[in-house]
Amino acid sequence: MDKKTPLFSSYSFNNNFLDEVFDSKGSIREVYKTLFDLYEEHSTADFEALNEYAKNSFFNQGITFQVYGNNETKEKIFPFDLFPRIIDHKEWDHIEQGVLQRSKALNLFLEDLYHDQHIIKEGIVPETLIESSVNYLKEMKGFNPPGGIYNHISGTDLIKHADGNYYVLEDNIRCPSGVSYVICNRTALKRALFGVFDKYQIHTVNDYSQNLLEILETVKPKGVDKPNCVVLTPGVFNSAYYEHSYLAKGMGVELVEGRDLFVEDCFVYMKTINGPKKVDVIYRRIDDAFIDPEVFNPDSVLGVPGLFKAYKAGNVCLANAPGTGVADDKAIYTYMPAIIKYYLNEDPILKNVHTYHCSRKEDLEYVLNNIHNLVIKPVDEAGGYGIHIGNKLSKKEIENVKAIILKTPRKYIAQPIMSLSVHSTYIESEKSFEPRHVDLRTFTLLGKDKSYVLKSGLTRVALKRGNLVVNSSQGGGSKDTWVLKK
């Protein structure tokens, strides 16, 4: 076994999971050897100091997120691990092609759903599944968004299974978050351990904001030469407010709240000290229900009265388009291989996790009899909320979950408990490295005749030993993700 530093002295191996840093014999994998040697030069005390430096860096920059509890909302620093994840160029090419394929197929699916619905008429996706989705907006029927793009920004969640293959856990195309942490993780690691970057050729992450702006500018309304883009945020109390402000700053555009905008003669304007300024493209980070109180939730104070009318008139572009949530419904996920085949005439590049939808009689029966071997997920939740992992439940808890499913079967899917890969992670309480489960959120941008995939991603880490839920809202952290150049 390779010599280990004290940092790795208590590292435990479990061959039931794929360890991305060490092989089954406990030897360091080739791609990590140089990095491992560099980290070996640091004592536990050195690393503890570096870890504290990174935490202070995040705190001083205000890199936080909100956790919503039953009785209170807490603001927390996003936990960051100083040992990066490395993905070689061949592996990354496969991932990039796969997430781009899914994003393109989802865009075509949305276009079809809101127009001729060929995929429903041909019996590939059930009409009842679409009509019963809370995210299907009948107000979008027959409307063509600028540039023909619905899901301008997509976040695809992947896991690496024990068989060495990547599987898609879910697609996020409403308001996917987390990309700012990808960029901040890189900055934090460079500040703490700059020397490690001299030994590897890694793709940059600093071009995301520029590419996002270029994508948004491609979907400008007709007749507009140089579009004025803004980021629309619900405000400082939103869980992802840091990201909203970070991306606005990175693109060099205004960060606005609903109260900063108004609609006149079906055009959108921003209030400025120099008078009204027309707005052409809005990267909106608020949910559909709140974008316009005249059309959706009448009690909303987050949106802009008349905004949807201006959008339907073609005078402003909203990214992502309202109604995209129907396609990232976890029940739709079960049809993704067929959706890709139908619109692109291609086999899926990335595999789906086998999924049972409880609205189907056979699936429901199987789920109720096998909850102890399954992960139960609500189709319309995010952030890890509402998830039940069967082998962690007591008999009483299993019966409670069954009752919840039977009450509204349409709302739940189930998947086998997947063997998420593990990665060496520094655990503060133990002052050493231990294996922890990880996943990967990638970010894909679609514009008119332009696309872009960020050559990195948000590696999320389940910091609790044995935990499979990696979301920050559930106590997870993150790592810098290196994609190696060829």
Image (tube, rainbow, N blue to C red):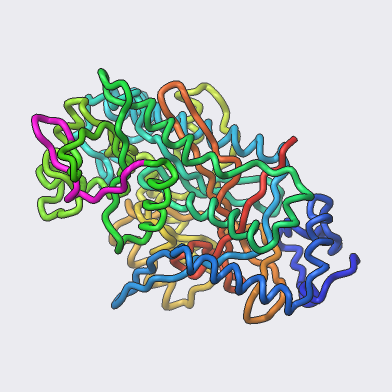
Tell whether 269 sits left or right of 265.
right
Tell whether 100 sits left or right of 136.
right
Q: Which residues are magenta?
A: 253-268
Q: Quadrant of residue 18?
A: bottom right
> Which residue corresponds to the image point at 41% horizontal and 64% vertical from the top-left?
65
In this rendering, the answer to whether 9 lies above or below 35 is: below
**Quadrant where the C terminus is found in the figure:** top right
Q: Nearer the viewer, residue 287 or 346?
A: 287
Does the image show residue 121?
Answer: no
> Which residue corresponds to the image point at 29% horizontal and 57% vertical from the top-left?
408
Residue 130 picture location, percent across and down: 30, 38
Residue 484 picture location, percent across and down: 71, 42
In this rendering, the answer to whether 417 lies above or below 114 is: below
> Which residue corresponds to the image point at 36% horizontal and 44% vertical from the top-left?
174
**What residue occupies the far front of the structure in this picture?**
274
Q: Nearer the viewer, residue 321 or 18?
A: 321
In this rendering, the answer to whether 437 lies above or below 297 is: below
Residue 61 picture location, percent across and down: 47, 63
Residue 286 picture location, percent across and down: 28, 49
Tell whether 209 sits left or right of 12.
left
> Which residue corresponds to the image point at 67% horizontal and 44% vertical from the top-left?
483
Q: Nearer the viewer, residue 214 or 100?
A: 214
